[in-house]
Image: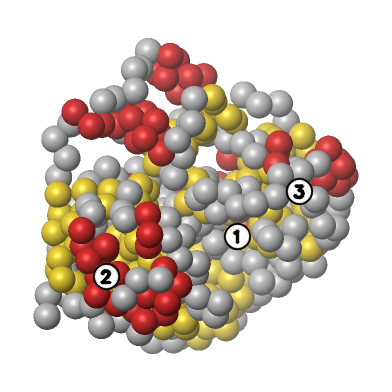
Amino acid sequence: MSLRVTALAGSALVQDRGRPGRTGLGVTPSGTFDRNAARQANLLVGNPEDAAVLEVVGSVTLHATHAAAVAVTGAPGPIDVDGVPRDTGQVLHLAEGAGLTLGPATIGVRRVVAVAGGLTPDPVLGSRATDVLSGLGPPPAAIGTLLPVGLTGDRTLTTRIETGVLGVGDLTVRIVLGPRDDWFTAAAIGTLLGTGWTVSPRSDRIGVRLDGPVLERAVTGELESEPVVRGSVQVTSAGLPVVLGPDHPVTGGYPVIGVVLDADTDLLAHAAPGRVVRFRRHPAP
Amino acid sequence: MRLRPSGDRAVLLDCDDAAEARAWFAALQEQTDATLGARTVLVRGVPAEIRRIIGGTTPGEVAGQARSEVVVPVTYDGPDLAEVARLTGLTPDQVVQAHTGTPWTVAFTGFAPGFAYLTGGDPRLQVPRRDTPRARVPVGAVALAGPYSGVYPRESPGGWQLLGRTDVPLWDLDRDPPALLLPGAQVRFEAVP
């Protein structure tokens, strides 16, 4: 059983919960950007919530080599099965040979496709996630790629789920200042929290790059490389913030002015170019 | 050492120097998900829980621990050997002697799987990065930048000064662990013709 990629304009990556706990090897956690969407899609098709899914940016068509139950979550956008329009957040039954087509997201960026049984390319270091920075995991899907699917148990399918509505307005995420907020002027902290930052088209799973006013340093000089996490807001030498995504490097040499709350980092999977991101201060835990 | 916030799923230990960071890392790596930086240790988890663990932990005695030594044979024919000699005021032979004469220590990892930042080598070998990074540095390239030496685990772009090359695989997924150089390990370079 497998899904064959028969059309693709954009990217389609296999993702799961990633490779936590391996930073000593220089390996970053990686994994699904919108973890909630992956959990929901897996729940719909009766998978364990961390089964491997397909994370799609753009449009894709998948043909089922055998009958399969699938579900699409994440960003809203067109879906059809053999030309018949369908919805996100519900189980779709594909007959053998049927084609599932996702058009580009209408709001947000990333769409998640789960299939009953989960995607089962060979794991690397305990995970099937594709880490775009280091190249670990299965190669990005291309037209013709056959995505193997695991065996389904006799788990019950959830028929429909409220996938949460992605608003069309600004994306507001909560941020804890530090560890290196003291490398910046008080004015820069005010600018960070008071600005509607514009998402740059150069954003990817490594980092969401933001355009806006320059954040002025109080401490000049270079920071010795230190470990970073998903959600760390690095300020580059140009003075602009980059919110690190799941494929961030293990360590970085730019000062981290603040870190987005872990739960809010999923929202940044939907930071489309031109979208406005705002930071709301959250007390340090 | 002082604790700094790093969001709601990690805490950063900001240490006075690299040795203190290594000592904390040695004490915490068994009981937590810890990552070593140049002068910091990041511990992932619930901050209140991490603070409690740190409160009950004494930094390890790194010097007293049995540390693994890795020997890396190098052919010193790199394209930047002459430039490193010029920058340091040494002859190319003296650069090789300096690079092989003092053992290095894995300070931290990052950049790419299997890439280790090595410190503690001969202090005369501090050189800046190249003005223009190379689009393609070959696998096994042995290099210098700032206070660090390192070996490229796979072909990648890179701005470090290239001294030579090694055939030793730095990263091998069929090996456990796949990375040859782990935090805290000692590394000795050996010149081969």
Q: Position of residue A221 (x, y in %)?
A: 65, 52
Answer above or below: position of A165 versus B47: below
Please report, as a chain letter, where disc 1 is located: A
Is there any visible trace of residue A151 in the rendered image?
Answer: no
Q: Position of residue A255 (x, y in %)?
A: 63, 48
Residue highlighted by disc 1: A207
Q: Residue at x 21, y 48 (%)?
A: B186
Q: Position of residue B27 (x, y in %)?
A: 30, 26
Q: Closer to us: mark 1 or mark 3? A: 3
Q: Residue at x 26, y 63 (%)?
A: B99
Mark 3 packing: few (<14 Cα in 10 Å), some, or many (20+)? many
Residue B6 sits in quarter: top right
Question: Viewer-proximal residue, A252 or A54?
Answer: A252
Please report, as a chain letter, where disc 3 is located: A
Q: Which quarter of the rendered picture does the C terminus of chain B lie within?
A: bottom left
Q: Closer to us: mark 2 or mark 3? A: 2
Residue highlighted by disc 2: B94
SS assignment at label 2: helix
Precedes in sequence: disc 1 or disc 3: 1
Q: Give the amino acid type for the residue marked by disc 3 in the picture.
A: Arg
Please report, as a chain letter, where disc 2 is located: B
Rendering colour mode: secondary structure
Q: Which mark is residue A217?
A: 3
Residue B111 sits in quarter: bottom left
